[in-house]
Image (cartoon, helix red, strand yellow):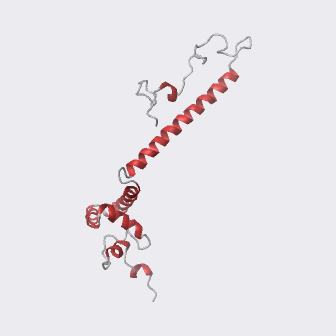
Amino acid sequence: MASSSYSNSPCAACKFLRRKCMPDCIFAPYFPPEEPHKFSNVHKIFGASNVSKLLNEVQPHQREDAVNSLAYEAEARIKDPVYGCVGAISVLQRQVLRLQKELDATNADLIRFTCSEMETTQDGRRIGEGGGSSLGQSPGFYYPYAWNNDPLGDGFQRGGDNNM
């Protein structure tokens, strides 16, 4: 027999639902037999009937993206039943904010160290040693938003640090 194993094997959805996989099966292109967990998770969260209805309503060129979104959301819901993928997005957004603050602090340190080495007065004193700003910083020095509480740099003050 020269036929491939795919043509003889039912898709993961039909195998899970214990039914015969027909040639026009709506699930077959998106739930291959090698990925039974993909359909299992989607079925557990959304139900086979709802997924079938959704796939029939979506344009054929958008179905693969729809199935991938359903599979991602289903896996996220199984891991975190309350927040699902929104919880994962929230964690990643907090991580981006934390890393942006760390990057801003590092850039500010780099600028401060570079400026302190380059800027000296005529008599050899560093700026800020005698006179200058009361905070010990160069006049007109801009600290990134981690210190001035202006995360967008648009001049509007926002609420305090939310430990993000």
Query: Is 59 on the left-hand or right-hand side of 139?
Result: left
Q: Residue furthest bottom?
A: 1
Tell me if residue 106 comes above or below residue 35 in the rendering. above
The residue depicted at 53 percent of the width and 39 percent of the height is 99
- Classify residue 9 by image quadrant: bottom left
The image quarter containing residue 50 is: bottom left
Q: Nearer the viewer, residue 163 or 55?
A: 163
Q: Residue at x 31, y 80 (%)?
A: 20
Q: Position of residue 44 (x, y in %)?
A: 33, 64
Residue 13 x, y percent position in the rendering: 34, 71
Location of residue 27 with respect to 127 vertically, above or below: below
Residue 153 pos. (x, y %): 46, 28
Q: Is residue 85 left or right of residue 105?
A: left
Q: Nearer the viewer, residue 116 or 102?
A: 102
Q: Position of residue 54 (x, y in %)?
A: 27, 62
Q: Residue at x 46, y 45 (%)?
A: 92
Figure check: 54 above or below 123? below
132 displayed left or right of 73: right
Q: Is residue 159 left or right of residue 122?
A: left
Q: Toward which corner of the image does residue 35 lie, by quadrant? A: bottom left
Q: How many numbered marks does the figure carry?
A: 0
Q: Quadrant of the N terminus?
A: bottom left
